[in-house]
Image (cartoon, rainbow, N blue to C red):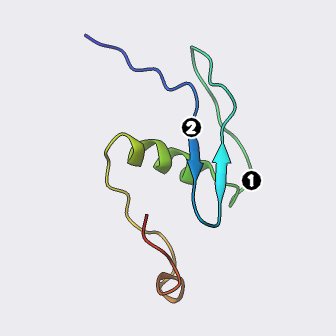
Amino acid sequence: MGRLAIRRVVYSGDKYSFESPYLNDGIVIMEGVNGHGKSTFMNLIYYGLGGRVQATLPLRCLAAATPL
């Protein structure tokens, strides 16, 4: 069986960019207060691997959102 190791996540968009720290082997624990991007980070990895991520914005924000 193969193995996949994600070492770094980088996103660059029109209004936002992000670069994660280097992710070592073993268990990586992400913690933080609500609204600081933990789920967004995991959705970015899932999307990058070909997953389909549903919008979680309130309806009033969907009109202003730009598609990826």
Q: Position of residue 47 (x, y in %)?
A: 39, 48
Look at the picture and state if 54 lies above or below 7: below
Q: Which residue is mark 2?
A: 9
Give amino acid for label 1: Val
- Residue at the top extreme, as displayed: 1
- Write the residue at 70% across / 31% down: 21
- Residue at the left extreme, as displayed: 1
- Circle 1 residues within 10 Å: few <14, some 14–19, many ≥20: few
Determine the image quadrant of residue 54: bottom left
Q: Position of residue 20 (x, y in %)?
A: 66, 37
Q: Position of residue 50 (x, y in %)?
A: 31, 45
Image quarter hosting the C terminus: bottom left
Q: Which residue is mark 1?
A: 33
- Write the residue at 47% across / 42% down: 45
Query: Is 33 in front, or is 54?
Result: 54
- Write the residue at 58% across / 41% down: 10
- Write the residue at 52% across / 89% down: 60
Q: Is residue 37 left or right of residue 58?
A: right
Give amino acid for label 2: Val
Q: Position of residue 12 (x, y in %)?
A: 59, 52
Determine the image quadrant of residue 8: top right
Q: Earlier in the sequence, mark 2 or mark 1?
A: 2
Look at the picture and state if 3 lies above or below 36: above
Query: Is 46 in front, or is 9?
Result: 9
- Circle 2 residues within 10 Å: few <14, some 14–19, many ≥20: some
